[in-house]
Amino acid sequence: MPGIDPSIISHSLCVDPMFKPVSQKRRSFNNERYEAIATEIDKLLKAGFIRNLDYNEWLSNVVLVKKKDGRWRMCVDFTDLNKACPKDSFPLPRIDQLVDATSGHELLSFMDAYSGYNQIRMNEDDEAKTAFITDRGVYCYRVMPFGLKNAGATYQRLVNRIFAAEIGRTMEVYVDDMLTKSVTAEGHVPNLRNTFMLLRQYQMRLNPMKCAFGVSSGKFLGFMVHQRGIEANPDKIRAVIELQPPRKAKDIQRMNGMIVALSRFISKLTDRCLPFFKALKHKGDFCWTAECQAAFEDLKAYLQQPPILAKPATGETLFLYLAFSEAAVSSVLIKEEGSVQRAVYYVSKSMTEPETRYPGVEKLALSLIVASRKLRPYFQSHPIVVLTNQPLRQVLQKPELAGRLIKWAMEISEFDIQFRPRTSVKGQAVADFIAEHSNPEVLNLSTGHVHQWEMFVDGSSNRHGSGAGIIIITPEGTLTQAALRFDFRATNNVAEYEALVTGLKIILNMGAEYVTVYSDSQLIVNQVNQDYQARDPEMIRYLRQVRSLMSRFIRISREHNSQADALAKLASTSDMKLPRTITVFRLPISNLSEDHQIGVLIPEPKEFHSCILNRKTPKGAQKSPPPWEHRKTPKGAQKSPPPWEHRKTPKGAQRSPPPREYRKFRKERNFPFNVTDT
């Protein structure tokens, strides 16, 4: 019997002795299936793959599965035997990495082993455990059969041992699927010669009907690979396009399974399939709605022209676009080829009910985490640049707002990740991804122009204090609002300038390049626009700061700025209870101070000792009197009566009657009155 020498490798079951042997009862079949079983038994006996067995402890039944050509394939039901076998933890290669390593080569040769599993011998001590029963008797396998629990791991261990010197250089191997590749056509023949030498040395046989040599493209592990990149398997796309509208829940489940196989190529997959998920949630009657049909047709239209994914070069910088919707987070990993951006991988994931309540920036952070987990090999071997106009870097570097941000920041700290503002779009696939997740009024993809950020500012000063309101709207429409309370005295004009300068510093720190600012102060607007001349020295200093920070300034009427105006008045009045989405931040010193610094509005947590440290008097400075010092009476002066002194009744005078409610209360409880009830 030809095959792999048992001294090189053989398959052992390693059955757990704690499991008792199971002997299945023989099943009955019709005459057609009995004939198919008899034919297969004769072939296996002639090839030397099985032998007769006189005594057995383990016994399994045969199972027949019809092939596409109408013939029968005989398998053995090793369910009980597999339960008693521990799992072999030998790793299988990642399909995505193998496909990436295969694309981009000029010539390819695809090879498939002939009955690959049957070329490995069974361990002699375990042959009897593979026994199976038919109407002609009991047989056991001498070679490794299909259906055993760890057969795939054993075969992968074999091919890794045989082609160790070629894997990753001229070959890629996944179990019994083998591929020889060459960057140029001239180098393909020498690579094939090395492959054939190894096959002959270890006596491994190929199936010529399933081999293709010296081709420019072909199917490998469910993908179409060629020199230009990676395409989806046309057979899988055709199967989805030819689907009829589902008539029951199982049809939707089957369709979802087919779509998941193409998930790498489908932008915002979860959002596209959301109507299907909703239809599966109905526990009662099946309901295929108009929304489901529209999503079904949209998916078919998308698959008519699926994208060709690019293969990243070793160590190449990759770019990541992030997006989120009401129900899902999505991302696309891209590479730049000259002036064009090409997609490498699309990622999408539905959000849980608590995750849908995350703020917009945290949803983007969640999208980054999902991408880093799904695309971990890319993140480990490539520098990643995240393109976003949101303050994602600042949030992940100062994650005091929520414990999950600390965890996420630590999780991605092992990768080489940088954050940059989103610029013009250089590829149609990337443009489609951004357009699906953006407001069309915000981003003009045809020209590559990014809409400006918008900021509304207003200051307020009254007898209770002074403060400012700031509202920032990102190009994606995310709204950030804050109220500032000044710990220094400020006039209305100073408060307006403080709001403007502080807001500009914040928005520039968030990565904005083009800003449209709205204010309702006529004086400030005209001074910045040089319609008015600033004469006050303090106003001149503020004006210099504004002109150095600001690129464009637009004046609007007061009613258009009512929200920022309300925040300013709120901050200047007092420390009030606010909704959780609005926080009052304190500004301890003026922007005119030389040591003034400001960052993104993320409030720092107060430690228990911060209040004590803040009250300490610097060394050499005079201590301020305690809060009760003003109550002391100067020496020799007459003490003022206590606050309750006026309540005492003069000696000999008649006391005033108690309040009506008090008298009623005493009567109800039969309490005696100390004064006359009038």
Image: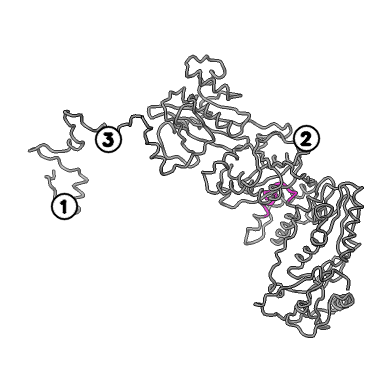
Q: Residue 339: which disc?
A: 2
359 is within the stretch colored magenta: no
Q: What residue type is labelled 3?
A: Trp
Of the image marks 1 and 3, the number of the one nearer the N terminus: 3
Q: Which residue is drawn at 65% across and 34% down?
A: 442
Q: Is the magenta stretch mostly helix, strand or loop?
A: helix
Residue at image coords 23%, 32%: 632
Q: Residues within 10 Å of mark 1 (few under 14, many from 20)?
A: few
Estimate how packed mark 3 is, as few (under 14), some (14 to 19) or many (20 or more) residues with alpha carbons within 10 Å.
Answer: few
Disc 1 secondary structure class: loop
Residue with the mark numbered 3:
628
Looking at the rendered structure, the kind of residue marked 1 is Phe
Whether label 2 touches label 3, CB < 8 Å: no
Mark yes or no: residue 327 visible.
yes
Give how far across and how far down residue 323 sits, in percent: 65, 43
Mark nearer the N terminus (2 vs 3) = 2
Q: In this view, does 308 lie above or below 572?
A: below
